Image: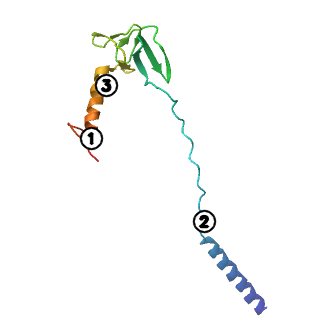
């Protein structure tokens, strides 16, 4: 009977030791997961949402769908864009869109002259001449 108790106690100790040894083992590392492919932009020219004078027509782009503007459209800030290229700003002044001029859906107008000026400033910044707001790396 005494041997029986000793044997049961020894088995319990061995079982408890094996359980604690299992708890301390390392977890297998995770498998590498392939990243999800991102949707690529369509090749070719893409336009931002807004109105653009192109080939003498006012083109409107909304949610990546571009079409010719048929009727007058009022924007958020009160600006109105007409199909013939006339833009009536919120303060009542009118302007006519020229080739390449752009009006955002919020009513901000960007002309080709503004774009050319920004491009020339960027060229100066690249060459290291002129005043630049960006820090040099």
Q: Residues within 10 Å of mark 3 (few under 14, many from 20)?
A: some
| Callout 2 touching callout 3 (CB < 8 Å) | no
| Callout 2 touching callout 1 (CB < 8 Å) | no
Residue 40 is situated, as x and y percent measured from the top left of the image, at 53, 35
**Picture residue at 32% right of the left edge, 20% below the top:** 112
Q: How many marks?
A: 3
Point out the tag, 1 or 3, that comes first from the N-terminus. 3
- Residue beneath label 1, please? 134
Which quarter of the figure has residue 130?
A: top left
Q: Residues within 10 Å of mark 2 (few under 14, many from 20)?
A: few
**Which residue in the rendered view is the most extreme toward the front?**
127
Residue 39 higher or lower than 18, as above or below: above
- Residue beneath label 2, please? 27
- Residue beneath label 3, please? 115
Which quarter of the figure has residue 131?
A: top left
**Which residue in the rendered view is the most extreme toward the bottom?**
2
**Picture residue at 26% right of the left edge, 45% below the top:** 136
């Amino acid at each position: 009977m005494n041997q029986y108790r000793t044997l049961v106690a020894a088995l319990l100790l061995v079982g408890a030791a094996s359980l604690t040894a299992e708890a301390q083992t390392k977890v297998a590392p995770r498998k590498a997961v392939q990243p999800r492919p991102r949707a690529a932009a369509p090749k070719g020219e893409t336009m931002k949402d807004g109105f653009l004078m192109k080939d003498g027509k006012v083109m409107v782009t909304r949610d990546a769908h571009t079409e010719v503007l048929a009727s007058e459209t009022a924007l958020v800030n009160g600006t109105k864009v007409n199909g013939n290229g006339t833009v009536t700003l919120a303060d009542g002044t009118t302007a006519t869109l020229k080739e390449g001029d752009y009006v955002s859906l919020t009513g901000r107008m960007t002309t080709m002259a503004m774009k050319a000026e920004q491009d020339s400033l960027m060229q100066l910044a690249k060459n290291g001449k002129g005043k630049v707001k960006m820090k040099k790396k």
